[in-house]
Amino acid sequence: MNEWAGLSDLVASALLIGGIKAMSHPRFAHRGIVLAGWGMLIAVVGNVSVYSHLAPATWLWAGVAILLGGGVAWLTSRRIAMTAMPQMVALFNGLGGGAAALIVVTELLNPASLRGLTLGFGLIALTIGSLSFGGSLIAFLKLAGRLRHPWRFRHQNELHLIWFGLIALLAVGFFTLPQTRDLTPIFVILAVGLGIASTGPIGGADMPVVISFYNALTGLAVGVDGLLLRNPALLIAGTVVGASGTLLTRLMAKAMNRSLGAVLFSHFGATLEKGTGEAEASKEMDLTDAAVSLAYARKIRIVPGYGLATAQAQHKLAELTEWLIHKGVEVRFPIHPVAGRMPGHMNVLLAEAGVPYELIQDLEEANPEFSQVDVVLVIGANDVINPDARNNPGSPLFGMPILEVDHAPKTLVIKRGQGTGFAGVANPLFTAETTYLLYGDAREVLNRLLAALKSL
């Protein structure tokens, strides 16, 4: 049986690595998800077979667990709206961290299984997995809009440092006390609590970085579990996920021109710094005039944001894009790395609507072209196009690379209202001389805009 388990781990690891590689390109992402899913199923079946001869009921319980977990995941993924995808990712990642922590808890129930160095690694995995579980739950609530205001008070970071010191002190007890069974639930509660408390103060604009960070922590915890259990599938899967999550976290932080320490401890993201208010002289444009601007343009850039996802307007946008391209207009989609509520959110949204990947531009490619296009159409984006990030040292966004939409000769912005973005920072672009606003639900506005275009 062990040989079959080893073979299944090898096959599962190959499928997982191949799946993650395929996910790096939208064209092959679906295939990558299927490959990785089959890899996980093979790993589970192979490892269950190791213990089935010791306990015949193992197959029954494993089957129930697979059907229950797979059924919940299938139903959830079928019903979840694209707008809720970020919070689903945060929740599932948190469950992964919690599962990694529970593996260590089961090992700690048998004191003879973890000793010396293995106990140390086990406590590290337990801490990391519990932190990821607690922090991801708060990220889920924030992204779902159920926790709108960050928890902040003076000396918060110092309190968290003391809290971490208590966890470290408790960890020493596992090595020195003769009876440690009662320490395990206290340790887990403290670690989960620290994840909750340390994520509470982080504002919305930093959520893409936070999600990536907790994804890396979950992978690391799973990798350590694989080391403890001598399980190649867990070790390889955890290492790959942890490494990719770490790389993505660095890329997200770089995209915001912020260090990871600043993200976790500087409490950016909900600072109500008003700057140049939109309540000043913003200009609205009639839909017919907007349609004329688009119809007679040669080059158009469309900047998607979370408002596009909220309105579920991606399919209507794809229809508008197809019409413009058919009329000979050059259309491209500049996407900021942290647009939306999770890494790659806008890319997934456009891919779902069938927008060709070749039309997507990254920040470095798009910025030099904004001054050369005729019109930029912004749909629900705010913070990632805020020129204060470049021009106003007093803005919380200052230093963050942005899409330099303000360099375009004309900008049309579809917005639901006069509110600020997720960071709570006003955007002077909306009161600029070359900017015109189209207020309303993005799907409805795009529908009417397309109708106006067809009537010209």
Image: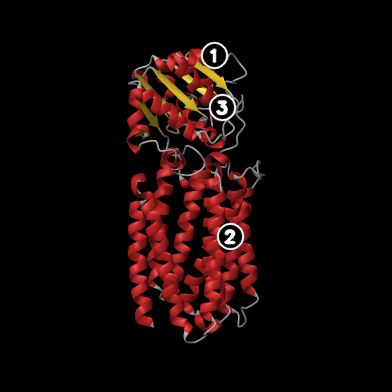
SS at mark 2?
A: helix
- Along the line of sight, which residue is nearer the eye, 371 or 195? 371
Q: Position of residue 86 (x, y in %)?
A: 53, 46
Q: Nearer the viewer, mark 3 or mark 2?
A: 3
Q: Relative to 70, is 443 above or below?
A: above
Q: Relative to 208, is 335 above or below?
A: above
Q: Earlier in the sequence, mark 3 or mark 2?
A: 2
Q: Nearer the viewer, mark 2 or mark 1?
A: 1
Q: Is residue 212 visible?
A: yes
Q: Relative to 49, is 33 above or below?
A: above
Left/right placement of residue 374 relative to residue 131 reads left
Structural distance between the alpha carbons of marks 2 and 1: 57 Å
Residue where numbered disc 3 is placed: 444
SS at mark 1?
A: loop
Q: Earlier in the sequence, mark 3 or mark 1?
A: 1
Asked if disc 3 and disc 1 are in contact, CB closer than 8 Å, the reply is no
Q: Which amino acid does the dot numbered 1 rest on? A: Asp
Numbered label attached to residue 286: 1
The residue drawn where x is 43% and y is 48% is: 249
